Image (cartoon, helix red, strand yellow):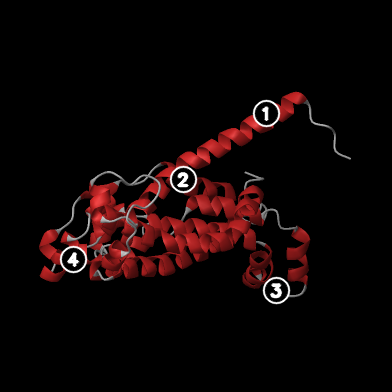
Amino acid sequence: MHAKASPGTRVFHVFNLFALTLTSVVCLIPFVHIVSLSFSDKAAVMGGLVKLWPVHFTLDPYRYVLQREAFWQAFGTTLGRVAIGATLNVLLVILLAYPLSKTEGKLRMRTVYVWIFFFTMLFNGGLIPNYILVKELHLLDTLGALVLPGAVGVFNIVLLLNFFREVPAELEDAAFIDGAGHWRTLWRIYVPVSLPAIATVALFCIVGHWNAWFDGMIYMKVNHYPLQTYLQSIVIKFDFNTMSPEEAKRLAKLNDRSIKSAQMIVAVIPVLLVYPYLQKYFVTGIRLGSVKG
């Protein structure tokens, strides 16, 4: 039987609901406005008539976007980055979190190793040393430049090692009694029971790679920009010098704000499709992975 909530508690819940609803609406309004711009014609956008609903509905901005070769090149670069980068991130996080989740009795200097990794969260070599390192390794203008510098995510390691520490020790002991080693125990015991935390880490990695733009601008040539770097460059300024005459004619019939909005919407769709499948693991993974320090 649940205890009856006090008047103060009910007021708090109402206020909380109101604050969260207001925050959600404030966050959604810019997105709805961008969607409306992407479906509105040139005259309505130029006249400032578009607010939260398309004016003179048209699909021309999306037709233009989907016909742009540069957009699909950037889209392909980002897909490759997400596929390789997120897979590498999750694999390295699992391989590092497992030994670091052990006690000092099972892994000597375990605390020292943890602090070494934690130190990298607070300090790094800086932009210029990182660029020199990538250049000397001959990684400029390759996917390696986008994937390798951030291959080891320390925050994700901390999240997953805390989850691994919640796995009952009896499972590991039973596996060792049956003759399993650490490698088999990791993949047959720890990974299957830690899927919520691993899915959370995978979501962080996927979204992180998908949204990254600054490293693409530093390490990649213009024709190999990842999607977010490409979008950042066109939001600032369209490069008319790279356009064909036919493309320039199509652009003259559209408003650049509509085109930019359409490209942003197309770019965000893949994450919106993936997130609902991983969202059910998200809260569970964060909650369970943050129980212990």
For marks 3 and 1 on the same chain, the one whose residue lies earlier in the sequence:
1
Residue with the mark numbered 3: 180
Residue with the mark numbered 1: 12
Counting from the top left corner in percent of width and height, residue 98 is at 60, 60
Residue 250: mark in rendering: 4
Counting from the top left corner in percent of width and height, residue 46 is at 23, 48
Residue at 27% from the left image edge and 49% from the top image edge = 45
Please state if 48 lies on the left or on the right of 34 as rendered. left
Q: Mark 1 vs mark 4: give the one in front.
A: 4
Which amino acid, mark 4? Answer: Arg
Quarter occupied by the C terminus? top right
Q: Mark 4 vs mark 3: give the one in front.
A: 4
Which amino acid, mark 1? Answer: Phe
Measured in 3D between alpha carbons, the distance from the residue under mark 3 to the one under mark 2, in whole angstroms, is 51 Å
For marks 2 and 1 on the same chain, the one whose residue lies earlier in the sequence:
1
Residue with the mark numbered 2: 28
Q: Are marks 4 and 3 in contact (CB under 8 Å)?
A: no
